[in-house]
Image (tube, rainbow, N blue to C red):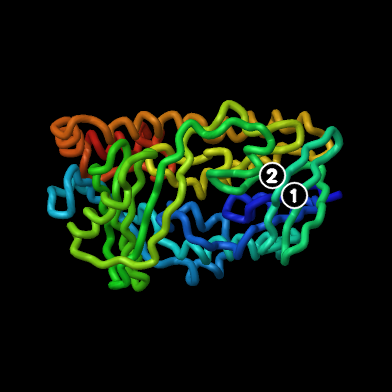
């Protein structure tokens, strides 16, 4: 009987496994394939990422430093509205290697991380949870006091635990041009229904192109338009779901969700690496596997940490659907040097950012 079984070893699952093992709990974690593959999201993150990985990993993970973003209402040749800082706004990292590094941190802390192990069923009981796990053609049963569902936007754990789906799952696609580019700015194009397209320079790793849109939108066609405008051929095409807006609860009696499974993501970018790991820390600090009542403490803790930012992110996303003349006006008025944090839309009202606006 493990204290915790973790299903999915992405950033949120690996972070929880590491912190729970460091706290002295007996932890097993299952990843259905190889950790880090297939790639399903961008590696453009805030500099806060370095608080979660060993110092020696930075040189291996870092691909480019970003100082701002050029916003466009139209395509590649349209007017750019720059938003920038004099110091780094964000970093571009090797996304696959990040997952592997975080999984190694969990192993080093004492968690039993098992790759190529697929959890096929989750049977929640009064005194624990029984998981059926498939590996190498064999099925076995694993028991745990509690289960952390960290298995992504189409979470099997969420479905079998009877937890509601996220309010929305966007369809995201991305691919790569291998031409090196160490540019200082990413490009954001407000040309996609209710979301945006992007171009991210990744240093020697090339350039990432991508977009996300609501279900039913012709994302492949829109992606072709994007890359045609930049006159590039891309490889390593990836596609996946981006969950937006968490359900009213992400726990049952002995199951709790983390990361994309809980839709702990930024509504205005779809990114969830830092939000998921923040929630994982909340879970370790709040949950006692011998006391199911502590799952209520986790619900309160992660919402206290993230719900305001998520709510503000919804308001920010609404700007993507404003009429084009209004978008041009807003971007023209707001562009320039900024004082915001890319993970915290509430920082728009910070003293630093308001000072930048008023000082123009």
Q: Secondary structure at mark 2?
A: strand
Residue 309 in view, yes or no = no
Residue 336: x %, y % from top left: 21, 44
Q: Residue at x 28, y 72 (%)?
A: 179
* Mark sitting earlier along the chain (1/2): 1
* Along the viewing direction, whichever of 234 and 267 lies nearer the viewer: 234
In this rendering, is residue 183 above or below 360? below
Q: Which residue is mark 1?
A: 5
* Along the viewing direction, whichever of 266 and 351 lies nearer the viewer: 266
Viewed as shown, does residue 82 lie left or right of 67?
left
Cα gap from disc 1 to disc 2, whole angstroms: 6 Å
Viewed as shown, does residue 336 lie left or right of 253?
left
Residue 9: x %, y % from top left: 63, 56
Residue 152: x %, y % from top left: 56, 47
User: Looking at the figure, which quarter contains the C terminus?
Assistant: top left
Q: Secondary structure at mark 1?
A: strand
Residue 190 in view, yes or no = yes
Mark 1: few/some/many CA within 10 Å (<14, 14-19, 20+): many
* Along the viewing direction, whichever of 131 and 201 lies nearer the viewer: 131
Q: Are marks 1 and 2 in contact (CB under 8 Å)?
A: yes
Q: Give the image quarter of residue 185.
A: bottom left
Q: Residue at x 72, y 38 (%)?
A: 255
Q: Which residue is mark 2?
A: 148
Mark 2: few/some/many CA within 10 Å (<14, 14-19, 20+): many
Viewed as shown, does residue 75 lie left or right of 136?
left
Q: Residue at x 35, y 34 (%)?
A: 351
């Amino acid at each position: 009987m493990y204290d915790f079984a973790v299903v999915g070893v992405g950033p949120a699952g690996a972070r929880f496994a590491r912190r729970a093992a460091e706290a002295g709990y007996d932890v097993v974690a299952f990843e259905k394939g190889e950790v880090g593959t297939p790639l399903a999201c961008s590696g453009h993150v805030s500099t806060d990422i370095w608080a979660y990985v060993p110092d020696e990993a930075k040189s291996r993970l870092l691909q480019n430093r970003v100082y701002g973003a050029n916003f466009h209402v139209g395509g590649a040749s349209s007017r750019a509205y720059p938003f920038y800082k004099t110091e780094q706004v964000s970093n571009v990292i090797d996304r696959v290697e990040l997952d592997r590094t975080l999984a190694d941190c969990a192993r080093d802390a004492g968690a039993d991380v098992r790759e190529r192990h697929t959890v096929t069923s989750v049977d929640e009981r009064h005194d624990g949870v029984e998981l059926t796990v498939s590996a190498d053609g064999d099925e076995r049963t694993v028991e745990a006091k509690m289960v952390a569902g960290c298995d992504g936007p189409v979470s099997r754990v969420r479905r079998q635990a009877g937890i509601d789906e996220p309010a929305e799952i966007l369809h995201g696609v991305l691919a790569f041009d291998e031409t090196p580019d160490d540019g200082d700015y990413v490009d954001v194009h407000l040309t996609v229904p209710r979301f945006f397209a992007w171009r991210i320079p990744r240093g020697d790793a090339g350039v990432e192109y991508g977009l996300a849109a609501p279900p039913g939108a012709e994302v492949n066609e829109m992606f072709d338009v994007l890359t045609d405008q930049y006159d590039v051929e891309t490889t390593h095409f990836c596609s996946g779901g981006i969950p937006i807006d968490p359900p009213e609860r992400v726990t049952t009696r002995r199951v709790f969700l983390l990361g994309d499974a809980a839709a702990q993501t930024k509504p205005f970018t779809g990114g969830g690496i830092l939000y998921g790991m923040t929630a994982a820390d909340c879970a370790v600090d709040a949950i006692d596997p011998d006391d199911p009542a502590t799952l209520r403490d986790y619900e309160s803790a992660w919402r206290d940490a993230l719900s305001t930012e998520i709510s503000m992110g919804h308001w920010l996303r609404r700007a993507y659907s404003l009429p084009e003349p209004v978008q041009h006006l807003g971007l023209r008025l707001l562009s320039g040097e900024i004082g915001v944090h890319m993970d915290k839309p509430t920082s728009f009202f910070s003293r630093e950012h308001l000072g930048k606006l008023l000082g123009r």
